Image: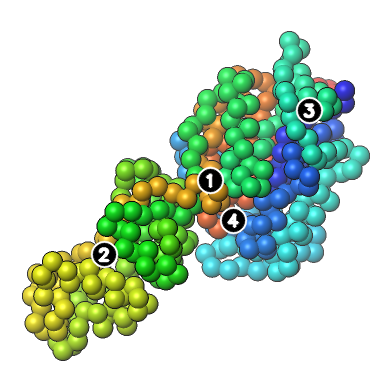
Amino acid sequence: MTGTDVIILGAGAAGLFAAGQAGQRGLRVALLEKAEAPGKKILISGGGRCNFTNLGAGPANYLSANPHFAKSALARYSPTDFIALVEKHGIAWHEKTLGQLFCDGSAKQIVAMLLDECPPDCVTLTCGVEIAEVARGADGRFTVTAADGRQWQAPALVIATGGPSIPKMGASDFAYRLARQFGLKVVEPRPALVPLTLGGEDVLFRELSGVAAPVLARAGEGKQKAEFVEAALFTHKGLSGPAILQISSYWRHGEPVGITFLPDAASDWLLEAKRDRPRTHLRTLLRERLPDRLADALADRLASKGSGLEQELGNCSDKELRAAQARLADWRFAPTGTEGYAKAEVTAGGIATAELSSRTMEAVKVPGLYAIGEAVDVTGWLGGYNFQWAWASGFACAEALGEALSRSQS
């Protein structure tokens, strides 16, 4: 049996970062990973260039049953802090749109950096570990037993195994099963940042597969309502693209999704066009502002049911044009579901924040047990926000572990 100060389960973004930070504070860390190599999800992120943070990351960019939970950790480890680490390791980076930061080179650089940050005399990474059992003794120490009989023991255990999104990468619900074993509640997990599927009358839009356009997409209700202005992409199964992935985290089965086509258009743009260009057709106007196939599909649907919208604008009634404007400003889709964990970039829900300290990530009722990263009910927007939560929660956890070690030595 290997004795150590802390066992971290999962060598993904949160686990790797927490291990390095804990090791730098003098803790002996056993970092256990199920896969044959660390950081597998990091390597495929951002098209292989890793969207490692977002300049604007703050509490408002995260979805959780407790919207205040992430504030403490995010305030103590900011995007600027991680950028400084990236630059210390000589990794060139660039900003894309909306504050998204990527490596100029490869996501492999981020994994290598995280490994380099782990002091070899303090952090021991063991891959290929299939965990058979996790137990907590009467003395409060945790024992992790692998399927091959190897064991590790420590007074602290960190759950950093993420959620079940992208199962082909080895993702599972292990974090939730372990949390429940120790009496922690779990907010119902669901796929997030995931394409939506369409059926019924909406299935007609599948003919537009491959067509993309900037839109304002909205979903959710009450405090869980959100809207994003980005591109939407029609697929052979339904809707995808950044705007749709963003709202998917807020969408619930049975709820509609609202799309504003031409989000920059003036409120009475069709009436103005009727006045200025009476010989023009609605289809022509839409083709000037949208991809032809999408413009035609929208024009066909607007002109259905005997309306006069196939005529020149000058022959259309103001009432018809106002109705068309309203429909284009709030086109309702009724998703039948999502493409599931296989296509989800992250998992929403997870270990309930009510069970954890927002300052330390430690379980309130189980001393020495911590949870960080995607395993926790904190889900970021698309664009580097989930990585920033991994760094921030990992830092908060490591800081708390360092404080605990100092107390034990004094």
Read off the residue under disc 4. Answer: 384
Given the image, on which type of amino acid does mark 3 rest? Ala
Direction top: furthest residue: 138
Q: Residue at x 16, y 89 (%)?
A: 279
Place of residue 29 in the rendered image (x, y in percent of width and height, measured from the top left): 82, 34
Q: Residues within 10 Å of mark 3 (few under 14, many from 20)?
A: some
Which residue is situated farthest in the right direction here?
121
Is there CB contact under 8 Å for labels 2 and 1?
Answer: no
- Cα distance between the residues tagged 3 and 4: 33 Å
Q: Nearer the viewer, mark 2 or mark 4?
A: 2
- Quick one: label 1 or label 3, which is nearer the N terminus? 3
Amino acid type assigned to the residue bearing label 4 in the image: Gly
Q: CA distance from mark 3 to mark 2?
A: 56 Å
Q: Position of residue 144 (x, y in %)?
A: 77, 25
Residue under label 1, please give it.
341
Q: Position of residue 366 (x, y in %)?
A: 64, 20
Residue at coordinates 34% horizontally, 73% vertically from top-left?
Answer: 294
Mark 1 in CB contact with mark 3 (< 8 angstroms): no
362 relative to 240 in the view: left or right: right
Earlier in the chain: of badge 3 and badge 4, it is 3
**Mark 1 belongs to which amino acid?**
Tyr
Q: Which residue is mark 2?
A: 329
Amino acid type, residue under disc 2 in the picture: Ala
Looking at the rendered image, the disc whose residue lies closer to the viewer, 1 or 4, is 1
The CA span between labels 2 and 4 is 29 Å
CB within 8 Å, label 2 to label 4: no
Badge 2 local density, few (<14 within 10 Å), some, or many (20+)? some
Identify the residue position indicated by label 3 in the image: 146
